[in-house]
Amino acid sequence: MARYTAVRREPVCAPYRVYRVCGMPPPSSGGITVLQMLSMLERFDLSALDPQSVEAAHLLAEAGKLAFADRDLYIADPDFVPVPIAGLLSRTYLAERSALIDPEASKGPVDPGRPDQQQGWNYQSGVSPEMPSTSHVSIVDADGNAVSMTTSIESGFGSRLMVHGILLNNQLTDFSFAPEAGGLPVANRVEPGKRPRSSMAPVMVFDADNDLVLVIGSPGGSRIIGFVVQSVVAVLDWGLDPQTAVSLPHVLNRNGDTELEQETVAASLAEPLQALGHSVIVRDLNSGLHAIQITPDGLIGGADPRRDGVARGD
């Protein structure tokens, strides 16, 4: 711990409709994966869809599959692995990936793509058991300064060790415990001094004049990405206020089952999604989204009703 130093890294940013969306770079997978999903969804007229329709759920799930396939193969600590960030965020590449989305049918789990800059890539996909003991806070002050911050100790009470009143995390579990697969090393394998891949996705959205319009993020393990994308779409495409956006029933897919939030309207989409070819699980989806929208008339906040956050302002 005495040798540990924080590393300042440039955010990853990409256009989405008339906006510019910025997020956290590797070793978090959140920023790239959120931006990939939004870019793949951009060709669809989401504003014409009911936010709780099977059509919207299908598109969110299919974009999630494609983005998570890339995430699991390519994203790890860039100090150890040559993450092809520019290739993964290339508009041309993401248009090709988006073209794989069939509005009428699900293809099931998908393979990762081959973005530019991945020539000579000698790594394999790996899975890490991310545990949801994370918090998020979004803040905008009177001077217009803003913070979108996600913090985690990985699982409940972290490593169960406390030093001077501070719980130590067990973030080691964000690594893939299998060092290789198919005879190739896993990019997110454990190595000395390496930072594990997370799914933290604190996001800021700017308009065409580069003015901040949205600050958002969530806890939730690797499901953070789906939570954040759905809420960003809810504000930017569906015109919902932040509280309504973060309260929407969740639908997401991490390149496997399409997960629907139990005891909500989303659960009623199980049969129609199965008819489109989805493998569906109805379960608890405990997000903790915090969002602030910046408007000409002032700030509008929203805190996820699934946890104990609250939107407050002076």
Image (cartoon, rainbow, N blue to C red):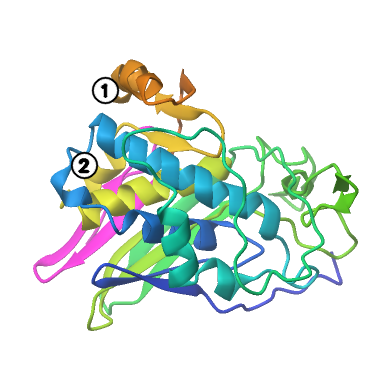
> Residue placed at 26% from the left, 35% from the top?
55
- For residue 100, side relative to residue 313 (left or right): right
Quarter of the rendering containing residue 272:
top left
Q: Are marks 1 and 2 in contact (CB under 8 Å)?
A: no
- For residue 302, side relative to residue 282 (left or right): left
Element type at mark 1: helix
- The x, y position of residue 294, in whole percent, is 21, 67
Check residue 310 for magenta coloring: yes
Badge 2 amino acid: Thr
Residue toward you, 222 or 299: 222
Nearer the camera: disc 1 or disc 2: 1
Instruction: Tell me which numbered mark, 1 or 2, is placed earlier along the sequence.
Output: 2
Q: Residues within 10 Å of mark 2 (few under 14, many from 20)?
A: some
**Looking at the image, residue 8 lies above or below residue 105:** below
User: Dot 2 corresponds to which residue?
Assistant: 244
Check residue 71 for magenta coloring: no
- The x, y position of residue 3, in whole percent, is 86, 72
- Bounds of the magenta span? 288-314
**Quadrant holding the N terminus:** bottom right
User: Which disc is residue 265 wearing?
Assistant: 1
Element type at mark 2: helix
- The x, y position of residue 44, in whole percent, is 26, 52
Residue toward you, 189 or 149: 189
